């Protein structure tokens, strides 16, 4: 996207996580500063765009698993710019009555999501910060669509690596406290485990962005599921979580899904 067409309120001089991810996914909603940042990551890890695509595929499998588990409500925190296989598309293809609330703190995501995603009786987009879960949980639009007395799937995919340890724990605890039995928590998370030097170089992409990225190892990601019961196969490399194919792929992110 050309800087002069940036929506009002969007800072085109500072890279943003949503737009860097959009570069990895081959999208058009990014600026020169985001492409330069993404290059720092892909110079260190040429397979990072593949990892982003694998993460989107995990999103699809996790949503399908939730529907198959009887869950019909979704809160997708750290939505990202609309792309293919958005949560409501996957969920509502399987059950048109499924309800989805998208939550993000980046103004460009909110502008594009509101323009492209149908504002409907079953889908909403709200501004919210995962580091301030109380604000999300009392949002009037969210509460119109989501009934926490019934099972809900809370998705935090590729977002908690933008939060400090205590913030990530507090966000999950705040949702855990209101989630009915049978609810699901799905996470994916960046890691540098097994390739610390390349990981150290890659995180440079987010050093001057609106949020920095921190890697966590498998044990740290497992610990985020405190108070939940992980479903099989536990916390694994993203491509290995209940794969449709052979589960081969990159080693940049962990994923897991757990029951309340
Ligand atoms: C890497 S993208 C992931 C998008 C999508 N969840 C996925 O996995 O395909 C990270 C998203 O999280 C959002 N984000 C980053 N920090 C956030 C925060 N503190 N609160 C809410 N959203 C945040 C970014 O704006 C971006 O849209």
Image (cartoon, helix red, strand yellow):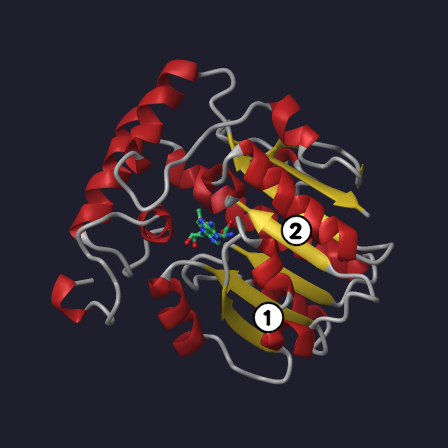
Residue 225 sits in quarter? top right
> The N terminus is located in which quarter?
bottom left
Q: Residue at x 48, y 75 (%)?
A: 117
Image depth: mark 2 or mark 1 in front: 1
Residue 162 pos. (x, y %): 46, 41
Sequence-earlier tag: 2 or 1:
2
Residue 32 located left or right of residue 256: left
Q: Residue at x 17, y 70 (%)?
A: 5
Tell whether circle 2 marks a residue whose Cβ is less than 8 angstroms from ligand 1.
Answer: no
Residue nearest the observer in this picture, 221 or 176? 176
**Residue to which mark 1 is pinned:** 139
Q: Is residue 19 above or below residue 195?
A: below
Residue nearest the observer in this picture, 18 or 43? 18
Badge 1 local density, few (<14 within 10 Å), some, or many (20+)?
A: few
Residue 88 pos. (x, y %): 60, 69
Q: Residue at x 69, y 29 (%)?
A: 223
Counting every numbered tag in the picture gives: 2
Q: Residue at x 62, y 72 (%)?
A: 142
Q: Is residue 155 above or below residue 8?
A: above
Residue 61's label in the rendered image is 2
Residue 173 pos. (x, y %): 70, 45
Considering every residue shown, the one lying at the far bottom of the view is 121
Residue 45 located left or right of residue 224: left
Residue nearest the observer in this picture, 183 or 98? 183
Considering every residue shown, the one lying at the far right of the view is 181
**Dot 2: what SS?**
helix
The residues bearing labels 2 and 1 have C-alpha atoms spaced at a distance of: 28 Å
Residue 87 pos. (x, y %): 58, 63
């Amino acid at each position: 996207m050309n800087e002069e067409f940036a929506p009002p309120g969007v800072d085109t001089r500072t890279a943003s996580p949503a737009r860097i991810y959009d570069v990895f996914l081959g999208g058009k909603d990014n600026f020169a500063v985001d492409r330069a940042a993404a290059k720092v990551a892909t110079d260190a890890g040429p397979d990072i765009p593949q990892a982003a695509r694998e993460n989107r595929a995990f999103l699809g499998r996790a949503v399908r698993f939730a529907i198959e588990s009887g869950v019909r409500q979704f809160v997708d925190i750290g939505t990202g710019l609309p792309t293919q296989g958005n949560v409501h598309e996957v969920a509502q293809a399987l059950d048109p009555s499924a309800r989805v609330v998208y939550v993000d703190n980046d103004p460009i995501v909110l502008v594009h999501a509101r323009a492209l995603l149908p504002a409907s009786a079953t889908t909403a987009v709200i501004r919210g910060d995962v580091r301030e879960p109380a604000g999300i949980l009392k949002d009037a639009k969210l509460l119109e669509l989501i009934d926490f007395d019934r099972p809900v799937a809370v998705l935090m995919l590729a977002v908690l690596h933008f939060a400090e340890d205590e913030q990530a724990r507090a966000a999950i605890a705040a949702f855990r406290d209101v989630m009915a039995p049978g609810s699901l928590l799905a996470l994916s998370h960046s890691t540098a485990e097994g390739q610390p030097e390349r990981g150290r170089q890659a995180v440079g992409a987010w050093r001057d962005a609106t949020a920095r990225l921190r890697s966590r190892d498998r044990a740290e990601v497992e610990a985020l599921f405190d108070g939940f019961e992980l479903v099989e196969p536990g916390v694994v490399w993203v491509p290995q979580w209940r794969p449709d194919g052979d589960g081969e792929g990159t080693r940049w992110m962990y994923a897991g899904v757990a029951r309340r």
